Image: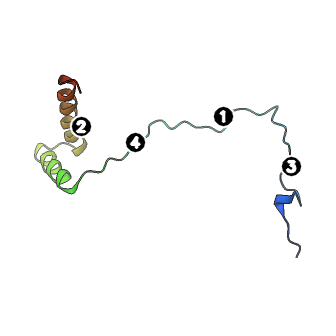
Amino acid sequence: MKKINILKGEDNAMKKEYDFSKAVQGKFYRPIAKLEIPVYLDKEVKEFFSKTASKKKIDLDKVVNTVLRKEMEMLKAIGV
């Protein structure tokens, strides 16, 4: 069996030039609607807020977001 070296242009390898004059830019592009970045909490922090959320019968993310919003307000108030 003959070895084929596609880097040297043997056996229907890529051509040196392609005609992109009729190409459509972004034809297959699909934007990601929303990118969620994971946030990792320390075990102690997660346990504390998980218990708080459980007692209040609300989701953990709502408790953490409420605390972080309050922190944001305090930082804004002191000019940070």
Q: Residue at x 58, y 37 (%)?
A: 30
Please say if the residues under marks 3 and 4 sit with CB atoms less than 8 Å apart. Answer: no
Q: Position of residue 62 (x, y in %)?
A: 22, 39
Q: Which residue is mark 4?
A: 36
Q: Which residue is mark 3?
A: 15
Mark found first going from the N terminus, 1 or 3: 3
Q: Quadrant of residue 1?
A: bottom right
Q: Nearer the viewer, mark 1 or mark 3?
A: 3
Q: Is residue 43 above or below residue 24?
A: below
- The residue at which mark 2 appears reads as 65
Q: What amino acid is at disc 2?
A: Asn
Q: Position of residue 18 (x, y in %)?
A: 84, 41
Measured in 3D between alpha carbons, the distance from the residue under mark 4 to the one under mark 2, in whole angstroms, is 14 Å
Q: CB atoms at circles 1 and 4 under 8 Å apart?
A: no
Nearer to us: label 3 or label 4: 3
Q: Are marks 1 and 3 in contact (CB under 8 Å)?
A: no
* Amino acid found under the numbered disc labelled 4: Glu
Mark 4 burial class by Cα count in 10 Å: few <14, some 14-19, many 20+:
few
Label 2, label 3: how far apart the Cα atoms are:
54 Å
Q: Horizontal placement of 59 versus 1: left or right? A: left
Q: Residue at x 19, y 40 (%)?
A: 63
Say which residue appears at 84% left-offset and 56% top-offset.
13
Q: CA distance from mark 3 to mark 4?
A: 40 Å
Circle on res. 52 = none
- Residue 72 lies, with reference to residue 61, above or below; the image says above
Instruction: Look at the numbered discs 2 and 3 and tell me whether their residues touch, using CB distance below 8 Å.
Output: no
Q: Amino acid at mark 3?
A: Lys
Q: Secondary structure at mark 1?
A: loop
Q: Which is more toward the observer, 77 or 21?
A: 77
* Residue that numbered label 1 is attached to: 26
